[in-house]
Amino acid sequence: RQTIQKEADRLLESLHRLFHNVANRRDGCIIIFVSMSKRKSRLEDRHMKSVMSCLLLLFLCASAMAGDCVLKTTRAACPGKEKESYSRCNGAASCDEQIQADSAKECAEKAIKSCDNSRPAITKSKEVSATFDGKPVEGGRNFCATGRPDYNKCQ
């Protein structure tokens, strides 16, 4: 029975080393803590290995659930405000922002939310398109409604 406990401790240490980087990323990874009782266990060594294999599979699947959503934002600056308007893209008119989303629908919703122009005196308009797992969302359309009263206008 002490051998089983030692094997369990060794497997948990291996899991800890394997998933240290995964658990410390900011990608929404699910962290599950496993506590081992100090009581004597009746599990045989092969059962413990099965449990550890299932935990390993669970960790691998949990980190792969979220998709890759990329928002491509292109800004049109108000006259003379190019430097300020493009500062969010490191001086370029267009840039990509990678965000986490569980589906293409959620990616589209986040693209729509990013259309809000919080700096109307600096940025005249924004165009936002999105890709989810490398595929254009809704045909790669511009999610920013061109019929908005603040679209293509400087204050």
Image (cartoon, rainbow, N blue to C red):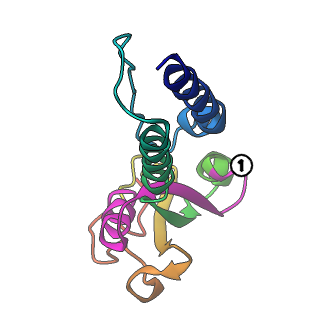
Q: Answer whether residue 73 is magenta in the image.
A: no
Query: Helix or strand or loop: what does disc 1 sit on?
Result: loop
Asked which quadrant contains residue 37, the reply is: top left
- Number of marks drawn: 1
Tell me if I can see residue 27 in this picture.
Answer: yes
Q: Answer whether residue 114 is magenta in the image.
A: yes
Closer-to-camera residue (125/60): 60
Count residues near mark 1 (Cα–Cα under 10 Å), then give few for <14, some for 14-19, many for 20+: few
Side of 142 where 148 appears, left or right: left
x, y percent for residue 96: 61, 62
Asked which quadrant contains residue 101, the reply is: bottom left
Closer-to-camera residue (89/51): 51
Tell me if I can see residue 28 in this picture.
Answer: no
Q: Which residues are magenta?
A: 89-115
Please determine whether, in this image, residue 138 is positioned above or below residue 31.
below
Side of 149 where 99 appears, left or right: right
Q: Which residue is mark 1?
A: 90
Please determine whether, in this image, residue 30 is positioned above or below residue 121.
above
**What residue appears at the point 36 percent right and 60 percent down from the top-left corner?**
110
**What residue appears at the point 50 percent right and 20 percent down from the top-left corner?**
5
